[in-house]
Amino acid sequence: MKHCIIVGGGIIGMCTAYYLSKAGHQVTILDQSEGQSGASFVNAGYLTPSHIMPFAAPGMISLGLKYMLSSSSPFYIKPRLNADLLSWAWHFYKSSNAAHVKYAMPIIERLNTASSALYHELHRHHKLNFHLEKKGLLMAYQTQKAKDQEQEVVLAAKAMGLEVTSLNPEEVLRLQPEVDMDILGAFHYHSDAHTTPHEFMAAMKSYLTEQGVVIHHHAQVLTVNTLGSTITSIETEAAQFFMDELIIATGVWTKSLLKKIGVGLSLEAGKGYRIDLSEPTGISVPAILMESKVAVTPMNNFTRFAGTMELSGINTIVRKERVEAIASAAKRFYPSIEMPTNSKREAAPGMRPLSPDGLPYIGRIDQYNNLVVASGHGMMGWSLGPITGKLCQQLIDGDNPDFDLAPLSPQRRF
Ligand SMILES: Cc1cc2nc3c(=O)[nH]c(=O)nc-3n(C[C@H](O)[C@H](O)[C@H](O)COP(=O)(O)OP(=O)(O)OC[C@H]3O[C@@H](n4cnc5c(N)ncnc54)[C@H](O)[C@@H]3O)c2cc1C
């Protein structure tokens, strides 16, 4: 048995704690927040074997440049001269090509499919009570251009064995009879499921606590102490913690924490927002509103609209124009839906940890013999939580990992 300390109590940290604790280790989680906000709470809750495209793909650069000056566009890069951002953008540019997409797609698909199976396994666990439904995902479009774009992904998805159906508006209405969508059509990916994130996080927290995992909130790790190639302890303002193994699962903050011990990592924050609507909407099937890049999820007793990708550094500023853009997209696709002002006022942000090539960072670092990094999951961190946790446990136990971890190495070159 080892004493493992996990820094970061988002989905990645929580799932890692689950698999480490299950394998018999003593686990402590330290998190700087109150444990109810951020990416792992505001996300769309999708478990997405269908999301096979890495964020770094052909067309993203021109899209970024096109949208650069519009702060209400779905993808916004705040213009600024920052060496880290420029280096990330350069690596992103180098990865945004067809060869990389071909390389990354099967890796993403296999990780997502394995993780989705683990979520279903967790759902069957009698002590983990959380909402999970498998109704697939609609990629809904209003224009022929968006349809043509998605058609290419559909072909690749089908080649990987995923089931996808093309639906006209009448067929979408039959699938979801209680709300009208103003669309040209939709592709229905049958593989996908959806959850209600805060429910899962709460269920996991209480289960882990019951299993003896110690969780400290308002505990920001400020110092990491090392002796040669070993990490000996970490310090918060209040205490010092010693460990056998350290797991850094700190989302967008991972770069700055690793910098303290001389490890470089290319990572940018991609801010998004969610608006929750507690009034009944009639929406019963999750959908991505393609032209607006807004994700819609029927969660447990409310509907969530989530979206936008804002590269403006690490901050939790809520930009009203971006929240308005999500609300207007909802109205365009579901004309009967009214978005109350208070729902927009309560919109909350979260930051996706974006690696430049769209693959997560999961692995050890050469300089240290007791450090594991689990971050950079970008738009898929919610889906990839369980498989990441399992892989971290396998690394720590010296087991053969379920996947080849070389493409996910935190030290890979772009
Ligand atoms: C709007 C939106 C919609 C999304 N929808 C989906 C979706 O449908 N499906 C999907 O798969 N993914 C989705 N994502 C992405 C997903 O939410 C993220 O990839 C995932 O939550 C990242 O999890 P994490 O644990 O790495 O990071 P986080 O959730 O950010 O957790 C990191 C934690 O580390 C803590 N921390 C940081 N530094 C320190 C420190 N020094 N000391 C102590 N604690 C520290 C922070 O407080 C934080 O709680 C979405 C994201 C957004 C923003």
Image: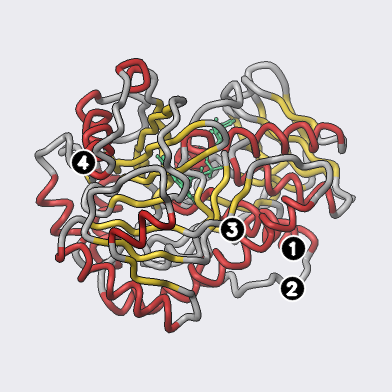
Front of the two marks 2 and 4: 4
The quadrant in which residue 174 appears is: bottom left
Residue located beneath label 1 in the image: 394
Nearer the observer, 148 or 371: 148
Residue located beneath label 4 in the image: 332
CA gap, disc 3 and disc 2: 17 Å
Q: Residues within 10 Å of mark 3 (few under 14, many from 20)?
A: some
Front of the two marks 3 and 2: 2
Of labels 1 and 4, earlier in sequence is 4
The picture places residue 212, in percent across and down from the top left corner, at 87, 35
Task: Tell me the element at label 2.
Answer: loop
Residue 246 falls left or right of residue 34 = right
Of labels 2 and 4, earlier in sequence is 4
The residue type indicated by label 1 comes to Gln
The residue type indicated by label 4 comes to Arg
Nearer the observer, 186 or 310: 186
Of labels 4 and 3, earlier in sequence is 4
CA gap, disc 2 and disc 4: 49 Å
CA gap, disc 4 and disc 3: 47 Å
The picture places residue 3, in percent across and down from the top left corner, at 82, 43
Residue located beneath label 3 in the image: 365
Q: Residues within 10 Å of mark 4 (few under 14, many from 20)?
A: some
Task: Tell me the element at label 1.
Answer: helix
Task: Tell me the element at label 4.
Answer: helix
Q: Which mark is residue 400?
A: 2
CA gap, disc 2 and disc 1: 7 Å
Front of the two marks 1 and 4: 4
The picture places residue 396, in percent across and down from the top left corner, at 75, 58
Image vertical order of residue 119 relative to residue 40, above or below: below
Residue 285 falls left or right of residue 228 = left
The quadrant in which residue 384 appears is: bottom right
